[in-house]
Image: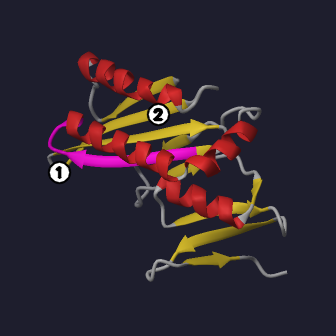
Amino acid sequence: MNISINGRHLTVRQDLRDLIEKKLSKFDRFFPGGADASVTCRHEHGDKIIEITITVGSTIFRAEEESDTFKTALDGCLSSIERQIRKNKTRLEKRMKADLEVPAPQLEDDIVDEEVMFDIRRKTFPIRPMTLEEAILQMNLIGHDFYMFLDAEVNKMCVVYKRHNETYGLITPED
């Protein structure tokens, strides 16, 4: 697994880097074809926050935890990602076998110039056609309330979102 460890407004100590690499190596058994992991550590309001994003093919696993120590936050992230993998194991096995032929997408995370009034976090990712069920699965895996995707049936950009009553909604453009 390719692991990149970054600190936002802090320097990540070597002992924490070693611990992250050691604990992430247990996921190698789930991704025999390889995966990319991005780990971001930061301080916010006295809490220590770790965000882990694992990308394999077009599947993205994401978890973010905050705690009083980085070690506790790391353990929470890892258990969350492992839970995501186990919960969706059969669906993911089918998709990962197909995705192993496709190079892993690079997830870019940039912050706009600080002169701008809003703190905007930009992410880019490759778009591939997928079904509504795949989009809902991907949305749940990354832990967001919405997900934009290219609908394979109508070949249009659509947005699936989680509603307050635990159902899902779909936004499609008009013709």
Residue picked out by circle 1: 45
43 or 168: nearer the viewer: 168
Image coordinates of residue 69 in percent, x first then y, are 17, 38
Q: Residue at x 84, y 69 (%)?
A: 154
Colour treatment of the image: secondary structure
Image coordinates of residue 120 in percent, x first then y, are 46, 56
Q: Is residue 115 above or below residue 157?
A: above
Q: Is residue 94 above or below residue 18?
A: below
Q: Which residues are magenta?
A: 60-70
Q: Residue at x 51, y 26 (%)?
A: 28
Residue picked out by circle 2: 38
Res 41 quadrant in image: top left
> Which amino acid is tagged 1?
His
Res 97 quadrant in image: top right
125 or 2: nearer the viewer: 2
* Numbered circle sitting on residue 148: none
First in residue order: circle 1 vs circle 2: 2
Instruction: Please state the total of marks drawn on the protein image.
Output: 2
> Mainly helix, strand or loop, the magenta region?
strand
| 103 relative to 1 in the view: left or right | right
Image coordinates of residue 44 in percent, x first then y, are 22, 48
> Which amino acid is tagged 2?
Ser
Dot 2 crowding, Cα within 10 Å, few <14, some 14–19, many 20+: some
Q: Residue at x 42, y 42 (%)?
A: 82
Q: Is residue 163 visible?
A: yes
Dot 1 crowding, Cα within 10 Å, few <14, some 14–19, many 20+: few
